[in-house]
Every structure is written in structure tokens, then in C-alpha cells.
Amino acid sequence: MKRWSIVWMVAIILVVTACSKQPNAETQEQSNQGPVEIEFAHIFKSDVIEKLTEEYNRSQSKVHVKSVYLAANWDEMIEKLQTRAVSRQLPDVTVNGFPYTQFAIDNFGIAPLEGLQEGGTNDLSDFFPSTLDMAKGSDGKLYGLPFAVSSPIMFINKDLFREAGLDPDHPPQTWSEIREAAKKLTHGDQYGVYFDYNATGNWLFQGLLASAGGQLMKDAASVGFNSGEGRKTLQYLYDLQNVDKTMPNLSKQQADQSFLSGNIAMSVVSAVNLVTYKQQAKFDLGTAAFPTTDGKPRKVPGGGGNIMILAQDPGKQKAALDFMKYMTSPEATTKISQSIGYVVTRKSALEQDQLMGGYLKKEPVFQAPYEQMGDMIPWQGFPGENGPKIVTILKDHISAALLNQKSVDAALQEAEKQANALLK
């Protein structure tokens, strides 16, 4: 990796001084005895995270990072962090889901990353603005850096398209086009489409809702999903599953297996599935942008999370920031993208042929999420300490409607009532 720039030196100084002017006895003892030990908590089972951590440890002698797989997804991660906060055992640096950025700021004592100015190889302007915005708090200050970024896209089985007389090179782009295509692609045990509507943090449901012109929150004190747009969104999913019967009632894991087995023709899920699907698909795999509502612009919630410093000790903050710089470099974000499927967070990585630029030319199936970068919106979270509970409430009521346990109207009304009670 390249040498530090003045930008990062300034950032380190400001973050360190945010909590204390002098290192405590523990930090001083660590500096005398060896490298500063810090813990990095994450949700990634991929070997690339362990390899990057090991590479960082070998690249210098002042910091040693212990990588810890703490949770399986962003919802579980915030719950684990809350539990560890109670016992004062928070990791020194962590990844945290975009919708929980403000929650983490409010509850974990995170200091803003001030002092990152333009200029130098680690210039903030090298990050895609839409992803950098998701690392900011409600005060507009930067509290982390985008680390793992994804967006929902549509995967298609081109072979099934051809068999149905559909053009796989011009897949459906709107809700109505998908609905009609799904009918032609459904027969026997084969289904036309799958939407991962219960994705972590109400993520994909938010994307559909935003594309219809709605939003999860009406204002700071009330949710906004019980609206005309919300009913249209949930009704669309209901119709696919219960009226047309073109969408199976499957968990994400079951849907993955069904899609890869050739039993689902279109799968609208996170682009993070790119690597796995490409490796395991035995058919001609294609990708397309996230579908739009007829006549509405595409709205794509940025999925994934930031890398954030939770350490309160100044010495560990300094060490964590150095590690964070390493893990968000153009080289590191390229390795993460190619190994896991997230999009790169640095423009220079996309521009250089030796990094992600050349890779996309060789692997065009990976291009879909980059084609909709300009349509990306923040992954909206519910405010306050009860935010994670509201995520679960909405998720459970969406499922209840699709399972015919509640009507679409009743599901949204009851979810709204319960959610608003928690916001007061």
C-alpha cells in the first residue's frame, strides 16, 4: 500500500484529540511493549477479509489487528454491538450497516472523522459521493468510511428466457414488464420471479417503496410506509405470490438454491450475490438494473455498511484509523469487490485497468450495479433506540400479508401503529 498522505495524518490527530489530550497508562504501556492490539468486528465469512487483515499486520509493526466474525448480517450486527456495549466490550473498529449509522453515533460514543481535506492519494473526493454520504451523521459530519457497498439488481437465467421466447439481452425493466414476463416464465415447478422483500433492514422493500414514490419515514416522529405508495408496493408483491402465483414463498437461502437449480427465472436480490451466482450457475447468467415503477425514476438504496471506530482510547483510535485507511484503499476495495461482490467505493479503483476497471471489461455481468450508481439513495433507518425493533415489526407484517394472514391494508396499518408507538 502507498505511504500515508498528510490528509490521514491530520485525520489521525483530530480523531485522537477528540477524546483526550494525553494517552492513558494502558496505551503508554502498549507502546513500550509492542504493537497496539485492536479488534475488528465484521460480518464477512470470506477469506479476503482475513487476508487483508493479515497483509496489514505484516505491512507494519505498530498495530496488530485481530479480525473477529461477529454476526451474519447487519441486523444481527447491531444487536451484537448493543449487547457488547452494555458490558463495555465493544470492538475497537467495526463495520456497521448503513441504516444504523445514526444509531451507532448516538449510542456508541463515536467521534467524527474531521480533518479529511482534499488533496493526496487518500483524498475523500476519490470516494463516490453517494456512498460517502451514507457515512455521515444527521449533523453532516463524517463518522466512518464506506466499506461494503451493494445495491439490489436483477439476475436472470438467460436460457429460460430463450425457452419462453423472451429476449435475454433486453430483460424487463419495470414492475409491469416483470409481471408479464414472470407469467410466461412460470410453469410446473418453475417460477418467473423472486424478490428478496425481507432482506435485512427492510432494504429491498425500501427500494421498491422509493421507486413507487414513497418512503419509510414521513417525518422524525412517524413512519411513512402506510401510504398509497406503500400499499401499491406491498400489493404488487402480494399479487406476484398469491394472484399470479409467479413468485414462490421461499427464504432467501431457499431462493438462492432454486435460482441456481434453474427453477426461478428472475431473482431480484443484492448484487453481493454476483460472485456466488457466477461461480455456481450452470446456465447463461445475466444481470440487469433494479426495476422501476412505470413512469417513475429508479431509486436504489445503497446496501452494505461503513467501517467505524468505536475505540475510546486515543492510542487505539489512532491505530484503528490507520487500519481503516488501509482497508478502504483502492487496492483493498478492489479485492473485496472481486471476492465478495460489493461495488468498489473508490473512483480510482474503477478507472484503473489493473484494478476494477479491467475486471469489468472481462466480466460484464458485474456491470449492473455500477450502471445505477447515480440512482443510489441512502438506506433509510428508523431513528431512536427502538429503530431495530421497528425493522422487525415491518418485516413481520410484510410476511403476514404475503402469507394471507392479514390484508395488505391491515398489515401496514398495524405495523404503522406499533412503529409510531416506539418512536414516541
Image (spheres, rainbow, N blue to C red):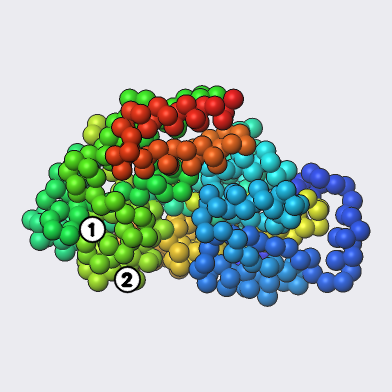
When the figure is inspected, residue 104 is found, relative to residue 383, above or below; the finding is below
Which of these two is toward me, 77 or 83? Answer: 83
Spatial CA span between label 2 and label 1: 15 Å
When the figure is inspected, residue 413 is found, relative to residue 186, above or below; the finding is above
**Residue 147 in which image quadrant:** bottom right
Q: Residues within 10 Å of mark 2 (few under 14, many from 20)?
A: few
Q: Secondary structure at mark 2?
A: helix
Q: Quadrant of the C terminus?
A: top right
Which residue matches tag 2? 280
Residue type (three-letter) at the residue carrying disc 2? Gln
Residue 258: x and y in percent read: 27, 62
Which residue matches tag 1? 264
When the figure is inspected, residue 308 is found, relative to residue 141, above or below; the finding is below
Q: Which residue occupies 57% across, 33% down?
A: 383
Does residue 302 appear to the left or right of 89 in the view shown? left
Which of these two is toward me, 338 or 392? Answer: 392
Which of these two is toward me, 204 or 419? Answer: 419
Does residue 119 appear to the left or right of 225 in the view shown? right
Residue type (three-letter) at the residue carrying disc 1? Ile
Does residue 212 appear to the left or right of 33 in the view shown? left
Residue 384: x and y in percent read: 61, 34
Residue 248: x and y in percent read: 25, 52
Q: Residues within 10 Å of mark 1 (few under 14, many from 20)?
A: many
Of the two numbered discs 2 and 1 in the rendering, the one whose residue sits closer to the viewer? 1
Does residue 38 appear to the left or right of 276 in the view shown? right
